[in-house]
Amino acid sequence: MSDARQFVDFRIDDRVAVVKVDRPPVNALNRQVEDEIEGVFKELGTLNEIGAVIVTGGGAKAFIAGADIKMISEKSPKEAFEMSAATQRVLSKIEKFDRVVIAAVNGLALGGGCEVALACDIRVADESAIFGFPEVSLGLLPGAGGTQRLARLVGIGKAKELILTGDPIIADEAKRIGLVERIAPKGEAVAEATSLAKRVLLRGPIAVSNAKKAINEGTDMTFEDGLRRETELFAALFETHDMKEGVRAFLEKRKPDFVRR
Ligand code: CAA
């Protein structure tokens, strides 16, 4: 881990990395926080033993309560363009990370915070978590991928309802509309995300990575192109040791020993 990082760090526990964004009072995003998130994911990408990443917020109040509003107020349109593009780049790196990334939403996930959660593969919410896109209340719109990812996840109508009203929703409602996949008891979001991560860790790691890629890339393709991409990624698995091991283990009625190659 790097000593130079001030607001974002990670710990590794049995092949699961837990990345914590910790910038009191509400873990608001600024350039430095985003650079540190990017740096952490770069470092995690070099660690072969890691099979899953969990992203969470420091403290009990917030996951991430959005972009730092003090920083936003000083931007020119050109700087705002650069800010939006830079944050989108960082979140795309989370989305494309070649292992599963789970958001453990431990509290407020507002604006850019919700957008971080959307860039993760799966979202687990503390039962007390609040989700929302308050940007329009500030005369802004979600500029870190929210208009695109939310609509893809929950549908255009719900995305418009949430983004155009700016009204927050509680965790149960977020689960009902498909914005989160699981609810955890109070204080247990990371534990619940870890148990989910451990399920994925039992599976073939390259298969998991290729399946994630097929789903992600297919979302932006025509159906036919998506099917073709799925076929390519399916066939690529037949070059791997792990695919042969997985099938052999099934036939030999034993647990597979996957080695990520
Ligand atoms: N940026 C900077 N500071 C923030 C902040 C943010 N997003 N959210 C809260 N804070 C600060 C407050 O200014 C306050 O600081 P002081 O103690 O120095 O006054 C401190 O955090 C605590 O906030 P509150 O006193 O308001 O605490 P609360 O419990 O009553 O409310 C809150 C917490 C619900 C998060 C509320 O502060 C709030 O609504 N914050 C704004 C959230 C928001 O609008 N996020 C979207 C930002 S825009 C964006 O994210 C654009 C994008 O797409 C990238």
Image: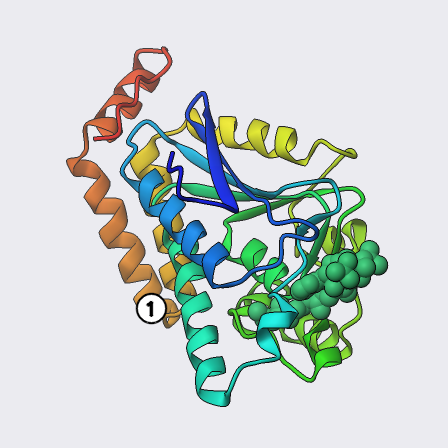
Q: Is residue 77 left or right of residue 140?
A: left
Q: Residue at x 78, y 77 (%)?
A: 165
Q: Is mark 1 within 8 Å of ligand 1?
A: no
Report x, y in % for residue 182.
67, 42
Image position of 91 with respect to 121: above or below: below
Report x, y in % for residue 183.
72, 41
Query: Nearest the camera: 109 or 123?
Result: 109
Q: Residue furthest left?
A: 239
- In which quadrant of the rendered view does residue 66 lie? bottom right
Q: Residue at x 76, y 48 (%)?
A: 129
Decide if residue 169 is in sight here.
no
Image position of 211 with respect to 33: above or below: above
Residue, disc 1 = 224
Decide if residue 188 is in sight here.
yes
Query: Nearest the camera: 240 or 118?
Result: 118
The amino acid type of the residue labelled 1 equals Glu
